[in-house]
Amino acid sequence: MSTLVIAEHDNASLKAATLNAVTAAQALGADIDVLVAGANCGAAADEAAKIAGVGKVLVADNAAYEHQLAENVSLLVAEVGGAYDNIVAPATSNGKNTMPRVAALLDVAQISDIISVESADTFKRPIYAGNVIATVQSSDAKKVITVRTTAFDAAPAEGGSAAVEAVGAAHDAGISSFVGEEVAVSDRPELTSASIVISGGRGMQNGENFTLLEAVADKLGAAIGASRAAVDAGFVPNDMQVGQTGKIVAPDLYIAVGISGAIQHLAGMKDSKVIVAINKDEDAPIFQVADYGLVADLFEALPELSSSL
Amino acid sequence: MKVLVAVKRVVDYNVKVRAKADGSDVDLNNVKMAINPFCEIAVEEAVRLKEAGVATEVVAVSIGDKSCQEQIRTALALGADRGIQVETEGSVEPLVVAKLLKGVVEKEQPQLVILGKQSIDGDNNQTGQMLGALTGMAQGTFASEVAVDGDKVNVTREIDGGLQTVGLNLPAIVTTDLRLNEPRYASLPNIMKAKKKPLDVFTPADLGVEVTSHLTTLKVEPPAERQAGIKVESVADLVDKLKNEAKVI
C-alpha cells in the first residue's frame, strides 16, 4: 500500500495544510510520498522532505504548473498517482479545484473533505453543512481523497529526511492560462491555521468598522474572519469568509462579533475549542453554540475588550 | 453561443436536516425542496449572458426523478429557453452525474457549461471539475466574474488567498461562487410561460451511460453537540473567564 500526498505550496514555501494532509494519509496505514508540482519550487520540495514520516518527495518543476492550473496539474497527478493506492490532498481551493479532475481521469469517485479515517476504505465526512456526518465506504481500488485540514493535527514539519526526486512529463493541456491575481497581503496569521480567530458579521455595519476587530486581533495575534453577510455586503473581501462554502476554521478561540449564527456560518467554525459570541440580540442563534456569550453593543464592547487585553 | 446550465433539486437551504433515528439516511420526509442556491446563480449568469447578446440559447438540465422537473421549470421561469431531464432514481454520485452531463454536452454542443460549485446536500464540490476532465474542457471554478471575449472566457475565481483570473479556451466550464450575481425572482407571467417551454426527457441508456456506484453510505449521524455555554455580564467578566477558566488567552 502506498499513498501520494499532493503538497499545497506557493513555489517558495510549503503551506501548513500539507502537514494536516500528511497526518490524514498516515491514518491510511501506507507508505507516504509527497508530490510537489510547481515552477521553481525547489524550496517547497526541500521543506516537504523534512516532514516526519515522508518516504520520498517527487518534484515536477515546470512552467505549466506554476499557477496550479487544474487542467495541467490533474494530468500530472493522474500520471504519477497511477502507481499509488491513495491520492490525498488538503481541501484547499487548489485541492478542490484539481482533485475531482484527477478522480474523473482515473474513473474513480472522490471522497471529499474527510474528517476521519475509519479504515483504509471507510471515512467520515460532513454533509448538509455539517448537520449530519456520513460514514462512507469506497469500493474503488484507488482512492482520491481531500482532507478537511482542521480535523487532523499537523504532522511535524521537521525530523524527516526524504529523498527528493524529479518526476513526471510536462503536461500542458494548452486550454487555460493564468491572467492575474489579487492576493491579500497581511501580517496576521492565516485564517485556517490561526490559533485565535475574531470574525465580524452584518452587525459591523461597514468595512471601516472592521478596524475595531483589528485592534483586538493585534492584541491577541488573531486572524480576522467574516460571515457571508459581511462579505456579500462588501464590507470585506471573499477570502475572509468563514462558513459552509468559505473557509473552515477550528482555532483554540473563535470570537464571533455581530454574527447571528446562520447554519451555513456555524458549519465553518463550530469545531473551534472555545467560542465567544458578542451580539446585542440575546436571541441570536450564535449563543446556542457559544461557550461564553456577551449580550452587548459591539461598538462599546470591542474598544473595551481591546483596552483590557 | 449556446449555454448549458445544470440544476439540482436539493433540500431548501433554510432547513436544518437531521439524521433518521436508525442512522440509515437523512430524514427528508415532508421537507421543503428547492433549486440548489449555487445552481440558481448559474441560471442567472446564463440568462444575463443571453440578455447581453453573448448567448443565443440557454438550456437547463437536471438529473433525477420526475420531481426535478420542478427545478427545471424554475430555471425556465428565470429565463432558460428549454429543459432536459435525465431520468434517474435515488441518489447519483458526482462521477456518474458528470458522465451523464458529458452525454448531454455531446448532444447539445454548448460553448459554455455553467454549474454550481457544490450542492448544499452532499457538499461534494466535484461535478464541474469531473465534467471538465471527461470532456477535456478547461474549467473556471468558484467564479465571481465571467467575461466572454471571442473564443475565450476570462473567469475570476475566489481562491484561498483572494482572487485569481484565468483565461479559458471555449468551450469551457464555469462553476459559480456566491458573489457571481444575485439571482432575480421569477415573475408570475414568466412562471406561466415556463410551463409551455419544451422539456425533453432522456434515460442514462439514451446517453450511453451506465449508472454505477463507487461509494456506500454505511451510516449517517448527528455531529457531536456542543455543550450549552454561559452568558457573561461584562467585558471584564469575559476576559477573566478566557484567561482563568478557558485559559485560551
Image (cartoon, rainbow, N blue to C red):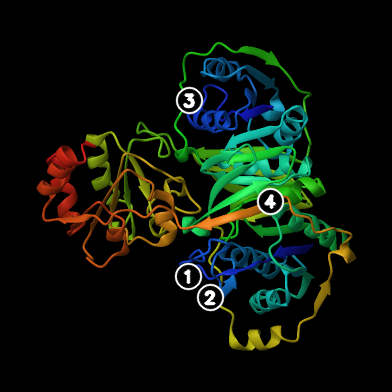
Query: Splitting the image into 4 quarters, where does residue B191 fall?
Result: bottom right
Amino acid type indicated by mark 1: Val
Q: Are marks 1 and 3 on the same chain?
A: no
Residue topped by disc 4: B215
Please state which of the two labelled residues, at mark 1 or mark 4, is closer to the viewer. Answer: 4
Q: Earlier in the sequence, mark 1 or mark 4?
A: 1
Contact between marks 1 and 2 (CB within 8 A): the answer is yes
A34 is higher (above) or lower (below) than B73: above
Q: Are marks 2 and 3 on the same chain?
A: no
Q: Chain of mark 2?
A: B
Discs 1, 3 touching: Cβ within 8 Å: no
Q: Which residue is mark 1?
A: B15
Label 1 to label 3: alpha-carbon separation? 37 Å
- CB-based contact (under 8 Å), mark 2 and mark 3: no
The three-letter amino acid code for the residue at tag 4 is Leu
Residue A113 % position (x, y): 56, 45
Which residue lies under the disc numbered 2?
Answer: B31
Pointer 2 and pointer 4: residues touching (CB < 8 Å)? no
Chain to which mark 3 belongs: A
Q: Residue at x 66, y 28 (%)?
A: A4
Secondary structure beneath disc 1?
A: loop
- The residue carrying mark 3 is A155
Q: Which residue in the rendered view is the most extreme toward the front?
A: B22
Q: CA distance from mark 2 to mark 4?
A: 25 Å
| Kind of residue at disc 3 | Ala
Q: Nearer the viewer, residue A141 or A250?
A: A141
Residue A111 shown left or right of residue A127 in the figure:
right
